[in-house]
Amino acid sequence: MDNTQSKNRLLSLDVMRGLIMILLAGEACLLYVSFRDLQPNGTTDYLFNHLLQHHPWNGLRLWDLIQPGFMLMAGSALYISYHNKLAKGISWEKNFRHIAIRCVKLFFLGVLIHCVGAGKLVWELWNVLTQLSVTTIIAYLIIRKSSTFQLVFSFGLLILTEVLYRYVLMPGYDQPFVMGKNFGSYVDMILMGKINSNGWVAINVIPTAAHTIWGVLAGKLLISKSTASKKIKTLVLAGICGLVIGYGLDMASITPIIKRISTSSFVLASGGWILLLLALLYWITDVKKISRYAWLFTVVGMNSIFIYLFFETVGYNWFNGFVGIFVKGFTGFLGTPENIQALLSAFVTLLAECYLCYWLYTKKIFFKL
């Protein structure tokens, strides 16, 4: 790593990216489902449904913040990488080719994950990697513009979303905020010939591109020469504004917070929470230098795309069961209840995947698109 990269590397961004990936890995390892099954219809079941599951429609839960966080961190990484390449004399135009190729790969990897999950060839565009491939291109196209322009552009995307949902009313798809009856579902029928049974829509790439753009702005702020105090205040103020406007639109019954179609209120409220979390992590790790256990998140975050692909494909379809054979087998001999066996197996699987990231990190093996 050269001096420019070392100087601009922020531990808070690495920690946040690693935290998001570990949370996603926990889901793929069935850790949360195993936790839920400890007390069916009890406390763990309640916590699972209200913290570790997406809200069924109108509302915002902890798990709804994972994808916005993923998008925002990608934006920050995009800007810092762009900034470092400029310092090396690599122009925007030359770097664009690399970005474009990377986004094509992300797009098709997202489609591949859907195929693996379905067990057959499918054409589905709802995966986060497919979405990220589009939001990255949008963010990069305006990365040279002023911060004011980028901010206004991001709000323009939210306004465009409002207009499309409210005023482009097609037969059978004329109810803006009703699952399966909205403009997003209409576009899915055109793009894929199908509607997602859980209400997800592909044109979420339009509003959630705001998250990636805000990530670019956050990355620009955090590596700037501004004082740490000013950086934190800016992130906190932006986060609070997002929460106030987002929840305000929802409570005033203007635009409901709906993650599955990324309404403007959802984008603002979720973005607000992520910016506040980023401010907190920046204060803890980069300002106060409290980083004793940060390495765990860092090593996972350094290979974020690889580990995401691993636990969504090989991990979910084979590795979970492979680990379960041994963990459940040995704990079964000890008379351990089945729900505890499942929880232990999921936890060991997660540890094994984290160790894989650590091993790759120590060998300096980094998978880049």
Image (cartoon, rainbow, N blue to C red):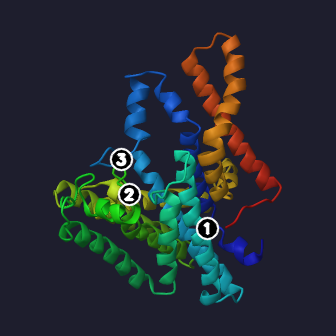
- Where residue 105 is drawn, which disc sits there? 1
User: Residue 183, can we see it?
Assistant: yes
- Under circle 2, the secondary element is helix
Residue picked out by circle 3: 198
Q: Which mark is residue 187?
A: none
- Work out whether 91 lies above or below 9: below
The reply to whether callout 2 and callout 3 are in contact (CB within 8 Å) is no
Residue position for label 2:
270
Nearer to me, 148 or 180: 180
In the image, farthest residue toward the right: 363
Query: Image quarter for residue 262?
Result: bottom left
Which of pointers 3 and 1 lies earlier in the amino acid sequence?
Answer: 1
Callout 2 amino acid: Ser
In this rendered view, identify the residue nearer to me: 266 or 11: 266
Amino acid at dot 1: Lys
- Which mark is first along the chain, 3 or 2? 3
Residue at x 64%, y 35% (from the top left corner): 320
Residue 61 placement, left or right of 1:
left
